[in-house]
Image (cartoon, rainbow, N blue to C red):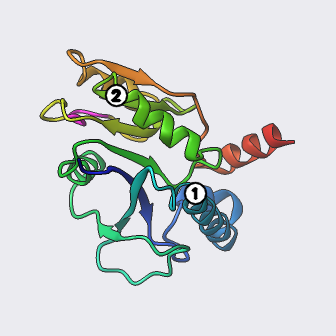
Amino acid sequence: MKRDQLVIFARAPRLGTVKRRLARGIGAMATLRFYRGQLAALLGAVGRDRRWATAISATPDRVRARWPRRVPVLAQGRGGLGQRMARAMRPHRRVVIVGSDIPEVGAADIAAAFRALGRADAVFGPAEDGGYWLVGLGPRRPAAPFAKVRWSTDHALADTLANFRNHRVALLRRLRDVDTAEDLRALEKTRR
């Protein structure tokens, strides 16, 4: 049996290209420091776990970047977010995608997602903003799991769940992703 696959969706950590909405609030250099630190922490927490194989799915394609850990780096390719996610998941029997901007995610969350795929066809980690920080699919999945999703809105999770009407779905704990300076302040407040 093939190992479960974890795919970390990430943008190459380069000044002025990561987390642009966050950069508007805290500046490009502070944003890059946050992003690099977050990516390093995530890879440190989940990247060497032997229960699954880990890879980064990176954008833009063919860009040279210094990644915080040595893991395979694959190009996301062209298309919208849903097309890129579906393409990254397609070759794997059981696969979990996690974003790179969720400071509270750890190995226990990834393990919980793969456990959930033992009894469900899909698993989602709901985000505070109406989206999701994690999606996992088992072998029984819709042909177009991310069709008609209004990305970057508070409808993203609900739109995606509509594609899974005839499938068993599991939900993990709700976490906050960091897209804006307000998200970062709220995260820091909860950590205090």
> Which span of residues is magenta-colored?
145-149
Residue bearing the label numbered 2 = 118
Query: On the rendered image, what quadrant is the C terminus found in?
Result: top right
Between 113 and 36, which is closer to the camera in this rendering? 113
Image depth: mark 2 or mark 1 in front: 2
2 vs 69: above or below: above
Between 52 and 169, which is closer to the camera in this rendering? 52
The image quadrant that residue 40 belongs to is bottom right
The residue sitting at 20% across, 35% down in the picture is 139
The residue sitting at 28% across, 41% down in the picture is 94
Badge 2 marks a residue whose secondary structure is: loop
**Residue 78 tag number:** none
Residue bearing the label numbered 1 = 42
68 vs 55: above or below: below
Q: Earlier in the sequence, mark 2 or mark 1?
A: 1
* Amino acid of disc 1: Leu
Where is residue 126? Give x, y as percent: 50, 30
30 vs 122: above or below: below
Name the residue at the front extreme.
Answer: 1
Q: CA distance from mark 2 to mark 1?
A: 24 Å
Between 168 and 76, which is closer to the camera in this rendering? 168
The residue sitting at 23% across, 25% down in the picture is 163
Badge 1 marks a residue whose secondary structure is: helix
The rendered magenta stretch, by its main secondary structure, is classed as loop
Where is residue 27? Give x, y as percent: 67, 67
Name the residue at the right extreme.
Answer: 192
* Amino acid of disc 2: Gly
Residue 5 part of the magenta segment: no
Mark 1 nearby-residue class (10 Å; few <14, some 14–19, many ≥20): many
